[in-house]
Amino acid sequence: MAKYKRNKAKETKSERKRRKSYADSKQMNFTPEVKTAFWTALVVLLVLGIFYLISIKASGGSFFKSKEKKDVEIQYTEILAGTSFDMGENYYVLYYDFENIDDEENSQLDEAKHNFESQSHETPLYTCDLNNSFNKPFVTTNEPNTNPYSAEDLLINGTTLIHFVNGQVENYIYGFNDVKTFLDSYQR
């Protein structure tokens, strides 16, 4: 029996030699083109992965945390100039540049809007940001059109208040001081 084990051990050793020589003879040799393609694909995948991780980090997201749902607040007071003629039967639209207005003028205008809204609950006051890129076609540096018949005719230059009745211009007030004075003194 001991003799049998020794023969088995010898066979195993010889089998190992045979397998090793077989594996060495069948070893894969890649051509330079295949190696280049492999490394290029690996680098591209790594770069895409890095950009993906950077975009997740930049957007404030997390890889492991689900995004929190935030409540969306819809406001109905700011409109686009192109919709000025379509807001109802009787309303005002205040056009001014929200960003490029002096802080003092902005606070005065906010106070005047508040006074107007507290005096008139029935007549809405909409605002229109002249700095908004959608409103740029309606902004002019020349004389404004004080009697527009439609949105296509609307040309605004600076702070302006327009009173609309049934889609027609009822009153056109131009200039910061005149607009502020009207809003401050408005009585139903």
Image (tube, rainbow, N blue to C red):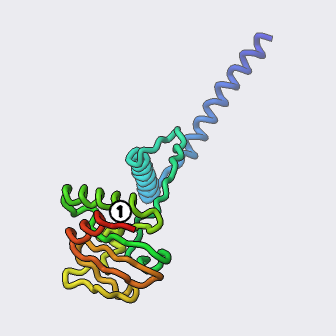
Residue at horizontal 38%, vertical 89%?
A: 149
Residue 33, by quadrant, is: bottom left
Up-down relation of residue 146 to residue 123 (above or below): below
Q: Nearer the viewer, residue 68 or 51?
A: 68
Residue 35 appears anywhere in the view: no
Q: Position of residue 39 (x, y in %)?
A: 42, 52
Q: Position of residue 5 (x, y in %)?
A: 75, 15
Rendered-image quadrant of the N terminus: top right
22 left or right of 150 in image = right
Up-down relation of residue 101 to residue 14 (above or below): below
26 left or right of 146 in image = right
Q: Nearer the viewer, residue 111 or 132?
A: 111
Give the amino acid type for the residue marked by disc 1 in the picture: Phe
Q: Position of residue 32 (x, y in %)?
A: 42, 56
Residue most extreme to the front = 187
Up-down relation of residue 178 to residue 146 (above or below): above
142 left or right of 63 in image = left
- Total number of numbered labels? 1
Residue at horizontal 47%, vertical 82%?
A: 166
- The residue carrying pointer 1 sits among few (fewer than 14), some (14 to 19) or many (20 or more) residues within 10 Å by Cα, namely many
Residue ID for mark 1: 116
Q: Position of residue 140 (x, y in %)?
A: 24, 81
Residue at horizontal 73%, vertical 20%?
A: 7
Rendered-image quadrant of the C terminus: bottom left
45 left or right of 106 in image = right
